[in-house]
Image: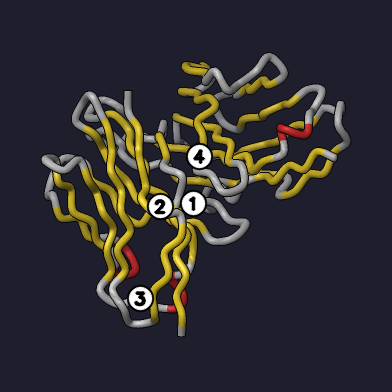
Amino acid sequence: DTGVSQNPRHKITKRGQNVTFRCDPISEHNRLYWYRQTLGQGPEFLTYFQNEAQLEKSRLLSDRFSAERPKGSFSTLEIQRTEQGDSAMYLCASSAPTGGRMNTEAFFGQGTRLTVV
Amino acid sequence: AQSVTQLGSHVSVSEGALVLLRCNYSSSVPPYLFWYVQYPNQGLQLLLKYTSAATLVKGINGFEAEFKKSETSFHLTKPSAHMSDAAEYFCAVTPGPYNQGGKLIFGQGTELSVKP
């Protein structure tokens, strides 16, 4: 198992352009989460999926943001018409139930750092 | 609603000294609590977690934390700091016991510096 993988690691884009990030969770993890982390702050929850269903979206997730997990495996996060305020580290995490017990740990990827110029 | 407050955005200790990073939480339900470490330009790595079992939790790299319900605290300690401990540390809470982990509320982080 190679852990949670995120691509690209870095993305520089011009304001107004669209960007898409990809997250590959640990295989067989049914839950996948997206967080955003700005400089000097803790990560903030954006949204999560259980299998292919998007179960919750934060109010932080404006209409310009959309996330998908079409087959319940990898996920994409798209930002349309990027703004300078979108510059941040976007983190993906995955988790899964462990046997009959409630899972209590999320495993994080290394993140995608977005810079909007 | 849940929230986390980390007291002190920067903590500096000498190598070999005690590390104490403070975390207080607010939760309307019995919480699960976590400490994560983040190295520059990296993701988060779990140090330890409290999930309503033993109140003194031992984690990786010699860290431990004690859940104190009466003080709503979950402070992180390490008896002897090492240079490699220099990083950003985040305390996080998630409502338990029904949450399957993952949706976390993070504190603002504490940057730990270790002086030779």
User: Earlier along the polypeptide chain: callout 3 or callout 2?
Assistant: 2
Discs 1, 2: same chain: yes
**Amino acid beneath label 4:** Ala
Chain label for disc 2: B
Mark 1 is surrounded, within 10 Å at the Cα level, by few (under 14), some (14 to 19) or many (20 or more) other residues, namely many
Q: Is residue B64 above or below residue A92?
A: below
Chain label for disc 4: A
**Disc 4 and disc 1 in contact, CB within 8 angstroms:** yes
Q: Is residue A98 left or right of residue A73?
A: left
Front residue of A11/A73: it is: A11
**Amino acid beneath label 3:** Ala
Circle 3 residue: B81
Circle 4 residue: A93
Mark 4 is surrounded, within 10 Å at the Cα level, by few (under 14), some (14 to 19) or many (20 or more) other residues, namely many
Discs 4, 1: same chain: no
Residue B36, numbered label: 2
Quadrant of res B83:
bottom left
Under circle 4, the secondary element is: strand
Measured as percent of width and height from the top left, residue B28 is found at: 23, 24
Q: Residue at x 67, y 28 (%)?
A: A77
Eye-nearest disc, 2 or 4:
2
Q: Residue at x 46, y 44 (%)?
A: B108
**Disc 1 and disc 2 in contact, CB within 8 angstroms:** yes
Eye-nearest disc, 4 or 1:
1
Measured as percent of width and height from the top left, residue B19 is found at: 31, 68
Measured as percent of width and height from the top left, residue A61 is found at: 60, 21
**Disc 2 and disc 4 in contact, CB within 8 angstroms:** no
Circle 1 residue: B44
**What whole-number distance in Å separates the C-alpha atoms at marks 1 and 2?**
6 Å
Q: Is residue A30 above or below residue A58?
A: below
**What whole-number distance in Å separates the C-alpha atoms at marks 2 and 4?**
13 Å
**Disc 3 and disc 2 in contact, CB within 8 angstroms:** no
